[in-house]
Amino acid sequence: PFLSSHSHSAWFCRIAAMGLWTAHLIRSSYVWESEIQQQSKYIDTLRQAAAQSQQDLNDGQDADSVLNHVLKNIMADAMGCIELFLKRGKNRADPAFLSKASDILFRGMWWCKLREAILQMVAGRYEGKQEIVDVQDLTQDLVRGREVTLECSSQMVKL
């Protein structure tokens, strides 16, 4: 009686338990592998977002560097006009110097408004859009505060 009827059921239970345990391990392994793949995708997405964020930061710094250079020159010009006005004293002060300083500062504000366009150009994402402008107004803004004779008629164009 090496094998009894009870031992068959015991062996069967052991084999069935081993099969169930193996099936459970395979299922668990699949679940873990699937979770690891999902987490890897999240990590890749985060890395890409971090790289894009760093690139945007670098582009912003480059654009600000260009703008700062332009604005420093504009501020120096305006400061020179104000100093010339002040050096002449109250009796001989020429208000034209203050007017010119105001015009120069206007150009500085104009450049500040262009910051977003500069940022897009540095990043290679600038997309121009056409709009109708008065050429005379545009050129007056460009030369405001400079010793330039402007001969430009008022004409509406699409730029």
Image: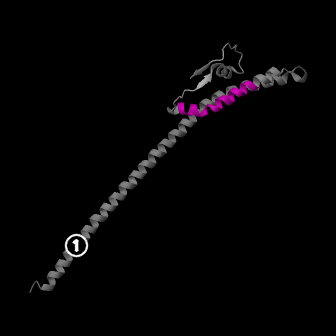
Secondary structure mostly taken by the magenta-highlighted segment of the chain? helix
Is 76 located above or below residue 25 in the figure? above
Left or right of 78 on screen, residue 138: left
User: Which residue in the structure is indicated by mark 1?
Assistant: 18
Identified by mark 1, the residue type is Met
Magenta span covers which residues?
A: 102-121
Query: Taking 52 as reference, is 17 left or right?
Result: left
Q: Which structural element holds mark 1?
A: helix
Which quadrant would the C terminus be assigned to in this image? top right
Question: Could you say which is closer to the camera, residue 117 or residue 19?
Answer: 117
Give how far across and how far down residue 154 sits, in percent.
66, 17
> Of residues 113 and 32, which is closer to you in this image?
113
User: As drawn, is 95 to the left or to the right of 71?
Assistant: right
Q: Image quadrant of residue 9?
A: bottom left
Does residue 106 show up magenta in the picture?
Answer: yes
- Is residue 9 within the magenta segment? no
